Image: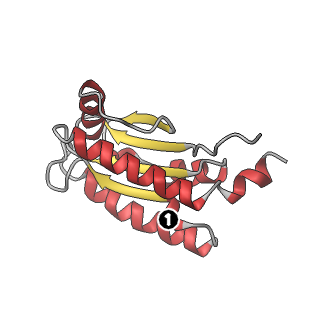
Amino acid sequence: MEKAYTPQIIGFLCNWCSYTGADLAGVSRLQIPSSIRVIRLMCSGRIDPLFVTKAIFKGSDGVMMMGCHPGDCHYQKGNYYTRRRYKTIKTVLEVLHLDAERIVLSWVSASEGVKYARVTKEFSNKITGLGPNPLKKEIFL
């Protein structure tokens, strides 16, 4: 009997908004997929494109990038950098013929625990529909 497929998703969350929103979702006992592994950064602007591409190349099924809403960044412009990098990462993945749908960018504030739970569920369901990362097979052979 085969095990049910559970995606491995990496979430890069800014400390001030998204991580606090995730904490609110947990305290509110909202259902959050267990497949998401959170990495807390002080600002979403600190998400290096190499972090995301390395996660995909190492076999992660999906990557979530979350930060403060544009204009609300505690470091003034960090989320604008994130938005630019996100578009660049998607382009790079498309050029490499990888599924660019495996990454997502979302803005979640500290008071949006419900939104955090919704976004994570939707992304987890989407990744489950896409199936395992094709690079995972090549890595673990």
> Is 103 displayed left or right of 8 in the figure?
left
Q: Residue placed farthest to the front in the image?
A: 1
Q: Which residue is mark 1?
A: 101
Task: Decide which of 2, 113 is in the foreground and name it.
Answer: 2
Residue 80: give x, y in percent of width and height.
26, 59
Q: Quadrant of residue 71?
A: bottom left
- Tell me if mark 1 has few (under 14), some (14-19) or many (20+) residues whose alpha carbon lies within 10 angstroms of its own: some
* Quadrant housing the N terminus: top right
Image height check: is 42 above or below 51? above
> Is 119 displayed left or right of 10 in the figure?
left
Q: Residue at x 55, y 53 (%)?
A: 128
> Is 77 displayed left or right of 66 in the figure?
left
Badge count: 1
Q: Residue at x 43, y 53 (%)?
A: 123
Q: Residue at x 27, y 33 (%)?
A: 25
Element at label 1: helix
Image height check: is 90 above or below 17? below
Q: Residue at x 39, y 53 (%)?
A: 122
Residue 133: give x, y in percent of width and height.
65, 55
Task: Decide which of 74, 119 is in the foreground and name it.
Answer: 119
Image height check: is 34 above or below 107? above
